[in-house]
Image: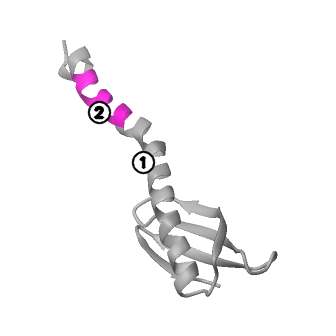
Amino acid sequence: MPIHSSPRLRLTVLLPSLVLFAAGPAMAAANVSAAQSEAKEIAKSMGNCTPAKVEVLRYTVGREGATTFKVGCTEDKDAFVVVQCRSRICTLLR
């Protein structure tokens, strides 16, 4: 029996990759929710905006993943700021 067709080898290679694949969305959701508090803090300190509602405009995965948030302000109904977070470092875009 060739080694590449061994059931044990297939399980050894396939199982860890399935676990990482299944954990991907959960890990991504945790990163987004952690970055929301950072985005609120940036909106408050740099954007002179008391944060109300936070929406995810764009979420990019990968080596340099980033999340772009639209943070609504309580001062005016139509006022908002846009904050981009890479890892846990956030910057005010607009």
Please identify the quadrant where the N terminus is shown: top left
Three-letter code, disc 2:
Pro
Main SS class of the magenta portion in the image:
helix
Per the image, label 2 sits on a secondary structure element best described as: helix
For the residues labelled 1 and 2, the Cα–Cα distance comes to 16 Å
Seen at 51% across and 76% down, the residue is 41
Classify residue 29 as left or right of residue 57: left
Instruction: Specify how the rendered protein is coloured.
Output: one colour
Residue 16 got which mark?
2
Of badges 1 and 2, the one in the foreground is 1
Per the image, label 1 sits on a secondary structure element best described as: helix
What residue is pinned by disc 1? 27
Expressed as whole percent of the image width and height from the top left, the position of residue 19 reads 35, 33
Three-letter code, disc 1:
Met
| Crowd rating for badge 1 (residues with CA inside 10 Å; few <14, some 14–19, many 20+) | few
Expressed as whole percent of the image width and height from the top left, the position of residue 56 reads 63, 61
Along the line of sight, which residue is nearer the eye, 7 or 23? 23
**Numbered range of the magenta stretch:** 9-19
Expressed as whole percent of the image width and height from the top left, the position of residue 78 reads 81, 77
Seen at 59% across and 69% down, the residue is 68
Residue 59 got which mark?
none
Q: Look at the picture and state if 28 lies above or below 85.
A: above
Expressed as whole percent of the image width and height from the top left, the position of residue 16 reads 29, 33
Q: Quadrant of residue 23?
A: top left
